Amino acid sequence: MNHSPNGGDAQALIARLDWTQSPLGPASQWPQSLRTAVDIVIHSPMPMLLLWGPQLAQIYNDGFALLAGNKHPKAFGQPTHLTWPELEDFTTPIYRAVLQGQVRSYSEQRFSLQREGQEQEFWLDLTYSPIRDEHGQVAGILVTAIETNERRRIALELKQRSDASLKAQQDSEQRLQLALAATESVGTWDWDIGNDRFLADAHFAQLHGVDPSRAGQLPISEYLHGVHPQDRAMVTRSIKHCITHADEYAEEYRLLQANGEVRWVFARGRCYKDHHGRPIRFLGAALDLTERKQTEQALRNLNETLEERVAARTQALAEVNQRLQNEMFERERAEDALRHAQKMEAVGQLTGGIAHDFNNMLTGIIGSLDLIQRYIGEGRTEDIGRFAEAAVASANRAAALTHRLLAFSRRQSLDRQPLDPNNLVRSLEELIRRTKGEHIELKFDLAPGVWPVNTDAGQLENALLNLVINARDAMPDGGELLIETANSYLDGNDISTLEPVKAGDYVMLGVRDNGSGMSPRVLAKAFDPFFTTKPIGQGTGLGLSMIYGFAQQSGGHATLSSEAGQGTCVRLYLPRLHSPAQAAAPTPNLGSTFAVAGESVLLVEDDPAVRLLVQNVLTELGYSTHAAEDANTALRLLESELRIDLLVTDVGLPGMNGRQLAEIARQHRPELKVLFMTGYAQQAAERQGFLDEGMDLLAKPFTLEQLAGKIRQMIRPAGGYQA
């Protein structure tokens, strides 16, 4: 292909093109790395194409313009996907790999393009190399293209003529001589194996250091002397393998010239058999790759030294950058002030909601206890019961509020167990029917074959019941309530959440109603803590935020869709449990909660009121109880000869915490059973990662019956005693 060594038409096209219509923008604003790459492309003696920027805009030289055919000059400066949509299946994986810093090379790729109004087929050797910008990041792709139509034509002709040579060797040799002169960049050979006669053209002989005048007089070993010493053994093995197996031969190797110059050659050939299956002829051609290799090396050098070449330009931009940094600093100060104000507003909303609800509950507790004390002093014991019930009810409401807060903050203790979502929904059907009221129609759409999940069954039940109650309140005049399950695959684009979505299999549990729905303003705040549209005293505003926190802590997601007057749909997505679900362990028959004679418990609790309460319960149940207010005191008892069947300890002890105490205790008493009590401990949020064999967890606040049952469950008469 003929093109100007000085840039030619392509350089003129760059000068007159309106670059504002190109993704590259005005040429005066191009970075130095782009300018350098364009300069290399325009002045290259080989057809070259530069793809630059996110849209891979095209700049190429005159040699490549001939390959582009009718797409030139419209393709110049435009994104490659607009110019070559028919090649996207071939180029997309290549571009992806090269933009990650890799090099891709392809030999004899077939293409079909319009040239001079006609469809033409041609073949190319292609190399795709990354080009880096001033920051060392890959910003573009450099494509070198060598048209191989002539080389392929000669190779095909050689094959056809070599086949004919099996019948007419003399004619084949004459036609080969014509092919040998077809191109000076391709050298050919014809080895008559049976007669050990090696015939090569002048170009092949000259490349391999053989006098062209003696090309038909020397054995093949003379040609191997020209192969680079480091590649000679490899080439010899390949030739031997080809002859032995009458196979195709393809090899890329170096040649060491007499003047010390190293040249690269790509050789391809085939060995033919006679009718007895014996190899008799080995024909092939060799292409001089030196110029292409040098171009690739120049490109690699360009990438490696680009940082040094742009250092001076980077220094010139330092003052501008400093001014920009000063402006950004002032802007960041203003943004920090705004974020602080927003944070304080959010904290105020959260603490205000907590204070409002807890003050109401504490009023019920303190007031009831105050009246109980007064009535006891006056001897009015008949009125104590209803005020004690009022105090317990307020305390239970406070406990429920703390559980919701922990769920919202994803710090509640989850007791994960494998479960079938459909079975869980069916087990709640009777309770849901009682909760919804007679004026609402209940429907179920439970998909068959729903995958198992691994989560806290109690927390999931509470979440579903909360959603049922919300749906009931949204349909005061009646309506339809649908509970559904389904298997789902999420790839990160299916749903919109505040948290990133990990692609994978999930189980969807949905609650849908056709009630009053939400306005866009209400919908935007629905998951916010303490946000509620219900009248004062009828809702804490933690229901949906608790459900959202539970879903996130379970490794899943929650979505909410609603329209005013159309209804609301809340969906929970819980990760699929891939391992086979295990049957739940049968609940042990605890029998009496009272102790067997001699059973002993060590209680460790830093809160005096809680320690007094639990110690009193243990004593009434008949356990020999030893109490300690911190871990150090407890260790002295554990290291003694006291019989201790169970260690009951708070997790959040001052100094050494309860989990650390349990680890040290088991060094002295390996079989010691441990019951942890916790109001909140971040490490205990996941029981499976916090508890070892022989350990369990009891969340505060708890009832005396729960405490007694848990202790009896852990101390089993048949389990032996730990002295």
Image: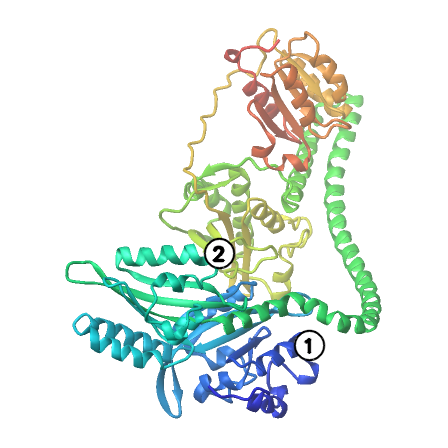
Image quarter of residue 169: bottom left
Above or below residue 606? Residue 353 is: below
Q: Earlier in the sequence, mark 1 or mark 2?
A: 1
Of the pair 18 and 229, the residue shown nearer to us = 229
Residue that mark 2 sits on = 230
Report helix, strand or loop for mark 1: loop
Image quarter of residue 15: bottom right
In the image, what residue type sits under mark 2? Gln
Q: Position of residue 119 (x, y in %)?
A: 35, 87
Asked if one can make out residue 46 in the rendered structure from this viewpoint, the answer is: yes
What residue appears at the point 34 percent right and 59 percent down from the top-left corner? 239
Alpha-carbon neighbours of circle 2 within 10 Å: few (<14), some, or many (≥20)? few
Of the pair 60 and 365, the residue shown nearer to us = 60
Alpha-carbon neighbours of circle 1 within 10 Å: few (<14), some, or many (≥20)? few
Q: Is residue 69 left or right of residue 357?
A: left
Q: Position of residue 373 (x, y in %)?
A: 78, 25
Report helix, strand or loop for mark 2: helix
Asked if one can make out residue 510 in the rendered structure from this viewpoint, the answer is: no
Q: How many marks?
A: 2
In the image, what residue type sits under mark 1? Pro
Of the pair 420 and 351, the residue shown nearer to us = 420
What residue appears at the point 56 percent right and 77 percent down from the top-left corner? 50
Q: From the viewer's perspective, is the residue at label 1 or at label 2 nearer?
A: 2
Q: Residue furthest left?
A: 275
Image quarter of residue 714: top right
Of the pair 579 and 558, the residue shown nearer to us = 579
Q: Position of residue 705 (x, y in %)?
A: 60, 24
Residue that mark 1 sits on = 31
Above or below residue 426? Residue 62 is: below
Q: Which image quarter holds the C terminus?
A: top right
Above or below residue 540? Residue 455 is: above
